[in-house]
Image (cartoon, grey):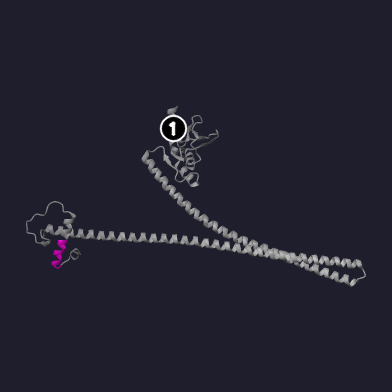
Amino acid sequence: MNAKLAAKRESPATDELWTVRGEDGATFGPATLASLQAWARDGRLAPTHRISANGSDWIAAPQLPALAMDWIVEVAPGTFYGPIHRQALDELIRDGALQPDACCFNRAVPEAAAAAAAREAEQAALAGQLAALRDRFGRSSAELEGQVRQLTAECDQLRGELAAKDLELEAERQELRAAVTRLQAELAKSRAAGVALEKQVAQGERRDQELTAARTRLAECEARLAQEDTQARTSQAALEARLVEAQQAQRESERVLLAERAAQADQARELKRLAEAVGTLRRRQDSARQLLRQAGELIADDAARGGVVIEDGLAVAEPEGTPPPRGPISLDQLEAQARREIHRLSQQGGSVFGKRR
């Protein structure tokens, strides 16, 4: 039975249905091998899960080679987690569950491959840090914009509240004025009624007291209104100062972003200039090689006709019956012969390029 189970782990059938069992005994499935592989890549298949193809023989999920759960990570000094899939490990690093510099190794590879995997993990961690910096910059910009919008909304809300307070105070002033007018009318009526009626006089005195109290309340309301106006102006000035600071921070962020874009554009232009220089050098090299090849062909033609030999840097007529030179000619010898041939032809009034045409 163990041999049969080991053979099934080594080469599982793709159409076989598998059942997954957790630590708590809960089971999931049935699922195909492709689904198990997708769960392993997503990290939904943990090292503690057990799987079975027949419901009776269970093995740990990392024991199935087709799931590629071979990576182990050191979550704390001396504490390891795994084995899990490589993509699941990268997802844990991106989500912040693991530190980007966490030690990771593959249990199925030798030390050299483990070192290469560590370097790849380090590169992935650096890429994650770069992405985190970019996300942090984007979030900072978004937060600044949100603060600006929030401050603007607070300013509008305070202006609306101040306008509502002004309307309320104006309504109170009108009511107090109306009350004063009514009290003055009653006072005049009571004085006109006659001094003889003491009750009416007392009533008039009471009305005078009420009028005084109303004037006192009016003065208190006016003082409270002035205090609230002062507080509103102070709050508005503070909000405007915060708005100016937020706008300055936003402009500074935009300036930094423009500087980075300009640096990237300069780098792209420098790379383009270097590529053009390399292309020019290659074209010059190809042209020189073509000239050397043409000169070699001319020298070979003249040597085959037995008309030219090279002596002391000059081309002279070769006597008849002289056998051609044996053995290969080096590139330096060919270049020297080409220069001598060009010199000879130039003395005879011709040119190499003219003869080739």
Whole-percent x and y of residue 106? Answer: 41, 39
Q: Quadrant of the C terminus?
A: bottom left
Task: Give the residue furthest to the bottom.
Answer: 192
Residue in the foreground of this view, choosing between 220 and 146:
220
SS assignment for the magenta stretch, majority: helix
* Residue at x-position 42% and y-position 40%: 105
Q: On the picture, is 153 further left or further right than 356?
A: right
Q: On the picture, is 269 further left or further right than 26?
A: left
Indicate the amino acid at tag 1: Lys
Q: Is residue 48 above or below residue 222?
A: above
* Residue at x-position 47% and y-position 52%: 131
Residue 342 part of the magenta segment: yes
Identify residue for label 1.
8
Residue 255 part of the magenta segment: no
Q: How many circles with numbers are drawn on the protein?
A: 1
- Residues in magenta, as a range: 339-349
Identify the image quadrant of residue 143.
bottom right
Residue in the foreground of this view, choosing between 300 and 238:
238
Whole-percent x and y of residue 64? Answer: 45, 35
* Residue at x-position 15% and y-position 64%: 343
Whole-percent x and y of residue 117? Answer: 40, 43
Whole-percent x and y of residue 22? Answer: 53, 35
Identify the image quadrant of residue 115.
top left
Residue in the foreground of this view, choosing between 34 and 223:
223
